[in-house]
Image (cartoon, coloured by chain):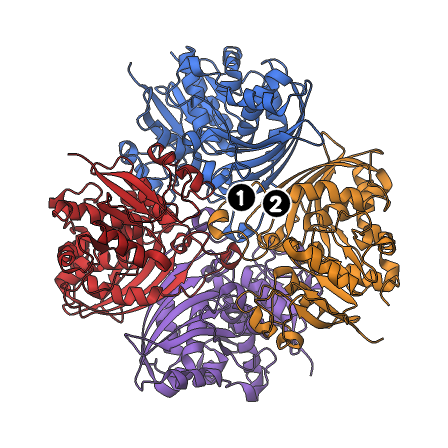
Chain colours: A blue, B orange, C purple, D red
Amino acid sequence: MKKIRVAVLGATGIVGQRIVARLENHPWFEIGALCASEESAGRRFEEAVEGRWRVPGDVPAGVRDMIVRDCRPDPEARVVFSALDAAMAGPVEEAFARCGALVFSNAKNHRMAESVPLVIPEVNGEHLRLIERQKFAPGGVVTNPNCSTAGLVLALAPLHRRFVAKRVFVTTMQALSGAGYPGVPALDIAGNVLPHIPGEEEKMEAEPRKILGDGMSPADIRISAQCNRVATTEGHLMTVAVEFDKKPSREDAAEAISSFAPLRAWRLPTAPEFPLFLHGNADRPQPMLDAGRGGGMTVTIGRLRADPVFDLRFTLLVNNLVRGAAGAAVLNAELAVAMGYVQ
Amino acid sequence: MKKIRVAVLGATGIVGQRIVARLENHPWFEIGALCASEESAGRRFEEAVEGRWRVPGDVPAGVRDMIVRDCRPDPEARVVFSALDAAMAGPVEEAFARCGALVFSNAKNHRMAESVPLVIPEVNGEHLRLIERQKFAPGGVVTNPNCSTAGLVLALAPLHRRFVAKRVFVTTMQALSGAGYPGVPALDIAGNVLPHIPGEEEKMEAEPRKILGDGMSPADIRISAQCNRVATTEGHLMTVAVEFDKKPSREDAAEAISSFAPLRAWRLPTAPEFPLFLHGNADRPQPMLDAGRGGGMTVTIGRLRADPVFDLRFTLLVNNLVRGAAGAAVLNAELAVAMGYVQ
Amino acid sequence: MKKIRVAVLGATGIVGQRIVARLENHPWFEIGALCASEESAGRRFEEAVEGRWRVPGDVPAGVRDMIVRDCRPDPEARVVFSALDAAMAGPVEEAFARCGALVFSNAKNHRMAESVPLVIPEVNGEHLRLIERQKFAPGGVVTNPNCSTAGLVLALAPLHRRFVAKRVFVTTMQALSGAGYPGVPALDIAGNVLPHIPGEEEKMEAEPRKILGDGMSPADIRISAQCNRVATTEGHLMTVAVEFDKKPSREDAAEAISSFAPLRAWRLPTAPEFPLFLHGNADRPQPMLDAGRGGGMTVTIGRLRADPVFDLRFTLLVNNLVRGAAGAAVLNAELAVAMGYVQ
Amino acid sequence: MKKIRVAVLGATGIVGQRIVARLENHPWFEIGALCASEESAGRRFEEAVEGRWRVPGDVPAGVRDMIVRDCRPDPEARVVFSALDAAMAGPVEEAFARCGALVFSNAKNHRMAESVPLVIPEVNGEHLRLIERQKFAPGGVVTNPNCSTAGLVLALAPLHRRFVAKRVFVTTMQALSGAGYPGVPALDIAGNVLPHIPGEEEKMEAEPRKILGDGMSPADIRISAQCNRVATTEGHLMTVAVEFDKKPSREDAAEAISSFAPLRAWRLPTAPEFPLFLHGNADRPQPMLDAGRGGGMTVTIGRLRADPVFDLRFTLLVNNLVRGAAGAAVLNAELAVAMGYVQ
């Protein structure tokens, strides 16, 4: 199989770098173009990220000398990964789509549009069919959810299927990398917690309803999200309490989580066999110890127990840069290829 | 008025130090004895805390040269503040009480005993009457709640009075100082969050029911608490969502909080005029900026708004060492003196 | 004595805020004007610093409602404190001086100019006489050194006087606040140290020679400075080793440091009686515990001992915002008033 | 070649864990015994390290179920790695040696003994010959230096060979993991720097003289070391200034560092081809970005430049757990095998 050449938009940012790193040695994709702001365009990729490369290890050899382009649509790009800021993502992604690309976007701009699939492959891969109803022909746009949403919905999915979640409380403790670079000034967060992340709660309350819905209408779940920034670098931690229609026992819930492996048959290159890992220790998950599980693609759930107000509660950790961003976009693209949406 | 001589048990620990500091220049109390473990007994107080003094500023001049005693009951001590560890607090506090002292304890040991008042002066000062039914005659034991409970209940109190709180979700992000010294190893918490604090959730779910009750039976409130340790030094931050019997508007809730000043008539030396401060900025409270409000006695509430699942939600910050421990015990003692329980 | 009305340039920045705070209740000065960038001009001071006020406690009541001005020279300002960025400090400070003001500047721009005094009152107050040779008539410019230099030179001064320092090695571990706001991104410094602070080493190697000189030519001292940024918020820590012409014993050095009180006769309002504090504990100074000594005006020296390569070595801590910036400028102004340079 | 069965003493500690991890899939060694304190003895290794496993990734599958032994000498162990605390390392290591083992120790106890080689393979591998003069027959003891010494001496070695170093100033900023677990309390180091690490400076001033010596007498180098603890987790950073007998140019020094590859002919399994990496960026090395270079075996040097007092200065980063401890002991053992000291 010949590899599919892809372009990465916003390749020099924190999420873009992760996409680039994930595509190194990818069996299906190879990077054909790295696009970024005017400021970076024309420079070697290694230079463009000098002093701000935030992926463990070095800049992959294969892209080090690639010349960064600006974000003008490129008719050769059939698969495009977008890690652009919301401030500019909308029109740029549309332009690439109209040029024929299937754009896998991490930006919020198109997520809630009716005909744009907002996809977590393990949860609602079949929503990809919405592409066919899009206005972006000949290409299309596929989005992955907000980083915190990604973790929450993955954890809820096996429980929701069997027990029908109705109401959810979630409080997040989110890592610095979620704010991009330069992001949060050190003076604001050293020895501190910031109790507000603009726009985050709204996303966490709306996006899960779309993802858990049937593609046409949202799921009937009410969510209250309270989002905080803490001084960790990678991995969003959150406490969750859920009320269900059919009250599950702790054991049934644990079994649903541990056996959740909906993508197994697809054999996608970067899908973990089990996207959820239920940790038995009382003091887990922890960002420092669990953010790397499954290369960042596995969400760790811990402290699963009965809740004195609702039915169940637990703590979860999602790698915001991988499962919540770069890895999510790449996995979406893999599923789209496997389902035949990429010609 | 002649000052009342008091003893401080556990005077060398983090909370004990704060009690000592709060008693410097106190108009009603003066320190007559500093008691601690065998290891510290016999040494000058300044020596005993060398390298572990954690209060901003120096060891107060008045106690620097005081010789630390062990914790054997002292018949001269009429008012005793206990900052002992739970591992030893129970029998030591009882022994002091049976010797005639009124013990104001920060330890958990007696908090839930039926005849022991668990008091926040602004909320249930009248529970002090339980002293009379105690088995510790001729003295008695008065407790203040767990540090996180103190903040939660103070915030709930004015709302509960008017609107009757029924169900509460709370997630905490608690400071390192709450674990005492040496407490949490730096390697465990650097760039990390610990999702479990043993025993903490149980206290936060039980103690508020007793404090908000009538002194005989607990209040009918159900609480779900999820407690986390973050790398801040002072001030426990928490997100709260509450369901009420009588749904309040955001404005009515704000008014109830801002006007809450139940101790005003008592003129207690260390009571802030308003124990709650409602902050209008979206990004407050923050541990770094708000833990010192009212010298640590004022709880800061922010982000008060309607909750999409329950009725109201907000974020609060309580200074765990002052309002949640040292300042709580001293304020309890002031109220007990004012009410005539100290002869 | 009628208070002298002063203006503060760059009043909304980290150093400017500290100057404003230090002038609250100052016995000789009162704030007549707060000046800042165009962006802040026209707004109430409290609004202009909202979300970035970094001084413990609230914005002083007396300036909360003062309307911020831009930095156009104001003929009424006789004493001006400048906390402007180096990028704009040069011409603005000159303009104020030519309008008649004596400008006390924290910026680097004029520090090394021959006719501009670079002053630490305890060390070279007599250099203020250079004002008379300046080209900025009718006003003048007085500078205080870089924050790290301030600590180093204060510590060296009593030793240099008696023993004549010849060669110095210094390695700094500097706090985040030294980089201003927003300054260092949290992602760059969390769990990290940055081994380079642009321009800092050059200042530390050049400024001490001017300050310790006779006002005409620099002192004959060679300094090697290596500057690092660490994740502390306030207080620059540094290790120092010194070679002297006349080898001092450890005891003679200690005595020289501890007895250093050259300003005593001047009775300046914010001068600490002893600008140096020699700590006897092996594990001091520490930024967290010692940055506040003397309200930030006292430099703490610890670990004074013989050096196996040169003669003496020690560790020192200087509060970079107070002794290294805001407090330095205010103390310079006090000395200038006392010496009759302000009419 | 049949693998050599080895024992690890102190296998549950921070350094012991790293040794265990480095021996997973080692081509020459395989773990035959894991030894630790009485408390851990008798438990499965995975249980014994539960909640304190500090190596990225999981406990290696091959040792997960191995039963931890106490530290009684085992006649079958021919090669032993010791990560014991200094408090008990001395007699235990001797006992193993007298039983026939060649002990590769990370502890300080025997380092400075005349007949015990203190070895960095790239620098003084030939000192291994001292084993033959030891009193520990039939076995022997080989030590690796203190973690900070390891980095300093590796950096000095190529310069010393060509230009003869005479005097050195070094100031360290050392990571938390250097203090073991639990080590430094978070309350002591959060937002702070500790200016003293007991015993560390003495080691850094004495050990390099032995290592750079001829095996009989120490090298004629004088070193002044000032050691600090900072809130990083892995990687000791240090500033260095050196005076040489033959003044090198910056270029000659750079060339000496970059071409340093003294082990190349030995083809040892875990030796990096180049043990030193000279970084060209002004803001490197940094603990967060460079501690992992060469799997932790490569020391990164940056900011190499002329020194205004001595001849050269630079900043270096050594991975204290790998090159400074676990990796050092394993590399010593590899060299000993290659040289024929292990039968």
Q: Position of residue B29 (x, y in %)?
A: 77, 70
Q: Position of residue B225 (x, y in %)?
A: 67, 39
Residue B310, numbered label = none
For residue C214, which quarter of the picture?
A: bottom left
Q: Position of residue C255 (x, y in %)?
A: 44, 85
- Residue closest to the eye, A258 or D62: D62
**C206 left or right of B198?**
left
Instruction: Describe the element under mark 2 as helix, strand or loop.
Output: strand
- Residue closest to the eye, A156 or C63: A156
The reply to whether dot 2 and dot 1 touch (C-beta < 8 Å) is yes
- Residue behind mark 2: B173
- CA separation, marks 2 and 1? 9 Å
Q: Chain of mark 1?
A: B
Q: Is residue B297 visible?
A: yes
Q: Position of residue C272 (x, y in %)?
A: 56, 79
Q: Is residue D298 visible?
A: no
**D220 left or right of A292?**
left
Identified by mark 1, the residue type is Val
For residue C174, which quarter of the picture?
A: bottom left
First along the sequence among labels 2 and 1? 2
For residue C220, which quarter of the picture?
A: bottom left
Residue B193, numbered label = 1
